[in-house]
Image (cartoon, rainbow, N blue to C red):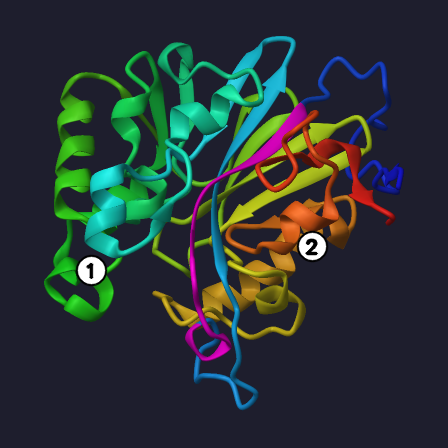
Amino acid sequence: MAAVRYGGAGEGPGAGVSDPEAFQVYAVKYAEKDGRRSEHFLGGDPHDGPMPMDYFVWAVVGPGGTWVVDTGFTEEDSRQRRRRLVRPVPDALASVGVDAATVTDVVLTHLHYDHVGGWAHFPAARFHLQEKEMAYATGRHMARPAVSAAFTPAHVAALVHQVFARRVVFHDGDVTLVPGLSLHLLGGHTAGTQVVRVRTAGGWLVLASDASHYYENMEAGRPFPIVHDVGDMLDGYDRLVALASEQSAIIPGHDPLVLERYPAAGPGLDGIAVRLDEGRVGG
């Protein structure tokens, strides 16, 4: 079935096929775990049942270079957290032609283990992070297990070391990285959670990461239970809609439906990598 491109062009000049600011965008699965609906909504779910979780990294590819969004986690993390690592992150990215070892810029949407644990896979990269997230991950809230459980101290400490190595680029709120690619501070999930807005040939696409784990979190207004500020998370759902050309161009962080709704990135990549900028398959 043919892919259907996003309908609108969003803010600013219309995005077309010849738009020099248009990027290709890929979602690449590297891990998974079993789960239930009651685990994925604040307050549980009255109709509990299976609801698996996928783990992704994203690649944003343009004429000026390649940006990777988040780093995934390692085999050691998968053992400690009891997640299934289906392919190492460098192998996952290689499936769409991205060499992790040579990537120069990585966006960290936040510092939970599954988004920063694979930082060492990117030896040539600078890491783009909200200053508020580093303050949060090294501040007083980390003394509370209910908050700190999704952080791995060794990962946070490693990023602190990278600050001194001049490999961390701090941002304070919304920022344009290059034309057609910007970061937006939403908070909610963590104090410094940021999302990535990308201009594609079909309009503005938003990589929501954990601003919304599943489509249903944002579409039903039901927050994921790992949350720093519920109000900010709910406001964040509205912000996602405002940033994207249309709601179908918002990509949640962990929903297996992403692999069903978008076309495979190439032959043999079904269930592994999809091309997000080509729009949903079948609309």
In-front residue for pair 84/110: 84
* Image coordinates for residue 135, horizontal then vertical, percent: 22, 46
**Category of crowding for the residue at label 1, using alpha-carbon neighbours closer than 10 angstroms: few (below 14), some (14–19), many (at least 20):** some
The disc placed on residue 241 is 2
In-front residue for pair 81/280: 81
* Image coordinates for residue 5, horizontal then vertical, percent: 85, 38
* Image coordinates for residue 105, horizontal then vertical, percent: 42, 19
The disc placed on residue 138 is none
Q: Quadrant location of the N terminus?
A: top right
The three-letter code of the residue at mark 2 reads Val
The reply, left or right, for residue 247 in relation to residue 139 is: right
Residue 248 position (above or below residue 17): below
> Is mark 2 in CB contact (under 8 Å) with mark 1?
no
Q: Residue at x 24, y 51 (%)?
A: 136
> Which mark is first along the chain, 1 or 2?
1
Residue 64 position (above or below residue 199): above
Residue 154 position (above or below residue 227): above
Q: Secondary structure at mark 2?
A: helix
The disc placed on residue 148 is 1
Mark 2 vs mark 1, CA separation in Å: 29 Å
The three-letter code of the residue at mark 1 reads Ser
Task: Give the total of numbered labels.
Answer: 2
Numbered range of the magenta stretch: 24-39
Q: Residue at x 56, y 61 (%)?
A: 214
Q: Secondary structure at mark 1?
A: helix
Q: Residue at x 57, y 56 (%)?
A: 255
**Which residue extends farthest front?**
268
